[in-house]
């Protein structure tokens, strides 16, 4: 019980010894307290360019030689086979051999192309987009507080506050007795 009474006595003594007085002072002027800083802001710049793309293709040809030995070889073989087989038809064998030799020679000539030494170049236009990032320096101004001039009993005072005070400033005075 005694500690409780002691706590109550201390609290009463403390409240009596410190008196608070709250007054409202008229605000005369308010100025922004500003902070300037430079910062870098990225800006992307894009453009479209038309670019040619070159494609080179070799030109191939096939053999179209009329002096090919295939029909002549066919004629000779046909005549020999025709003479040995039929005895009396070397001309018919030569004709058939020449025709078969020509068709085999033609097939070989067309299936094995050769490069003529020439090329054909084609040009195709493509649109390509190029982007780059530029950094621009920008000045940023921030309000970090307010410089307030106020009047109390005919005396001008200045304080800095974090928020805008409005038309009055609340002043607390403590008097220790």
Image (spheres, helix red, strand yellow):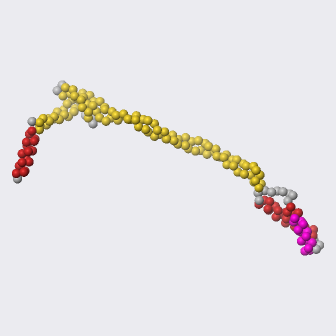
- Of 115 and 124, the residue lying toward us: 115
Q: Position of residue 26 (x, y in %)?
A: 21, 29
Q: Position of residue 162 (x, y in %)?
A: 27, 36
Q: Position of residue 81 (x, y in %)?
A: 89, 71
| Start-end of magenta stretch | 73-86
How many marks the image carries: the answer is 0
Can residue 98 be seen at all in this image of the molecule? no
- Of 134 and 20, the residue lying toward us: 134
Residue shown at 64% from the left, 44% from the top: 52
Q: Locate residue 158 relative to residue 116 in the image: left or right.
A: left
Q: Main secondary structure of the magenta part?
A: helix
Residue shown at 82% from the left, 64% from the top: 104
Classify 77 as above or below 142: below
| Quarter where residue 125 is shown | top right
Q: Locate residue 5 relative to residue 85 in the image: left or right.
A: left
Residue shown at 46% from the left, 38% from the top: 135
Magenta stretch contains residue 78: yes
Magenta stretch contains residue 29: no
Can residue 153 be seen at all in this image of the molecule? yes
Classify 19 as above or below 72: above
């Amino acid at each position: 019980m005694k500690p409780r009474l002691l706590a109550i006595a201390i609290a009463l003594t403390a409240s009596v010894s410190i008196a608070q007085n709250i007054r409202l002072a008229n605000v005369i002027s308010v100025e922004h307290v500003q902070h300037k800083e430079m910062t870098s802001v990225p800006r992307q710049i894009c453009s479209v360019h038309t670019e040619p793309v070159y494609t080179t293709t070799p030109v191939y040809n096939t053999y179209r030689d009329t002096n090919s030995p295939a029909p002549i070889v066919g004629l000779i073989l046909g005549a020999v086979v025709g003479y040995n087989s039929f005895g009396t038809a070397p001309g018919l064998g030569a004709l058939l051999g020449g025709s078969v030799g020509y068709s085999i020679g033609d097939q070989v000539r067309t299936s094995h192309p050769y490069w003529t030494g020439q090329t054909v170049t084609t040009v195709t236009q493509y649109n390509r987009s190029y982007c780059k990032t530029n950094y621009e320096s920008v000045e940023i101004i921030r309000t970090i507080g307010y410089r307030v001039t106020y009047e109390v009993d005919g005396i001008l005072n200045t304080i800095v506050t974090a928020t805008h005070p409005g038309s009055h400033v609340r002043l607390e005075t403590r008097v220790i007795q």
